[in-house]
Amino acid sequence: MIECRNIAKGKGKGELIVSSEPISFLGGVNPETGEIIDPNHELKGQIIKDKVLFIPGGKGSTVGSYVIFQMMKNNTAPKAIICLNAEPIIATGAIMSDIPMVDSPSETKDLVNGALVEVDGDEGIITIL
Ligand SMILES: C/C(=C\C(=O)O)CCOP(=O)(O)O
């Protein structure tokens, strides 16, 4: 069990997709498919739909919050989001899209690509399944 700060309520479970780089949702993610399209991003070509996304945080335009909302409407959003340090763009997007989100995990060594995890945004807990 990894303790975190809770940012957006709800529980979400899925396979982790991990990036050491922040993501700009506006221009960096295709909300129609959930694919990372930023040509300079380490996850370029990967799909974040139904994954648990673990990133340092967001970057870029505040419109990114609405891209996350559009992904929820399109059913292409991640099941949950974990950030090292939440910032307002992704936090707002997650809260208004009902995507569970936490930040400041107490440890990160087990948060590796492909791990199956559950994020509890109510209690601020990540469980490795
Ligand atoms: C609301 C904005 C643009 C739009 O309506 O498309 C401005 C967003 O400003 P950022 O500096 O990109 O956050």
Image (cartoon, rainbow, N blue to C red):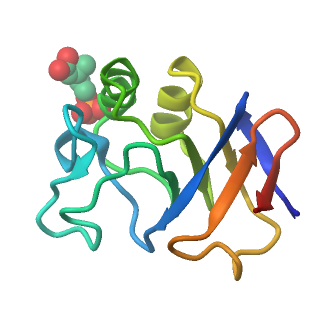
Q: What number of labels is visible?
A: 0
Q: Within the displayed image, which quadrant is ligand 1 positioned in?
A: top left
Between 108 and 17, the one lying in front of the other is 17
Q: Specify the farthest residue to the left.
A: 39
User: Is residue 109 found left or right of 51 in the rendered image?
Assistant: right
Which residue is painted at 21% across and 49% down in the image? 28
Occupied quadrant, residue 101? top right
Which residue is painted at 47% across and 28% down in the image? 93
| Residue 59 position in % (x across, y down) | 36, 51
Any part of residue 58 in sight: yes
Occupied quadrant, residue 95? top right
| Residue 105 position in % (x across, y down) | 76, 63
| Residue 10 position in % (x across, y down) | 72, 29
The quarter in which the N terminus is drawn is: bottom right
Which residue is painted at 70% across and 82% down in the image? 109
Residue 99 vertical position relative to residue 117 in the rendered view, above or below = above
| Residue 113 position in % (x across, y down) | 51, 74
Between 57 and 35, the one lying in front of the other is 35
Which residue is painted at 57% across and 31% down in the image? 99
Residue 68 vertical position relative to residue 127 in the rendered view, above or below = above
User: Is residue 54 found left or right of 84 in the rendered image?
Assistant: left
Residue 28 vertical position relative to residue 90 in the rendered view, above or below = below
Occupied quadrant, residue 39? bottom left
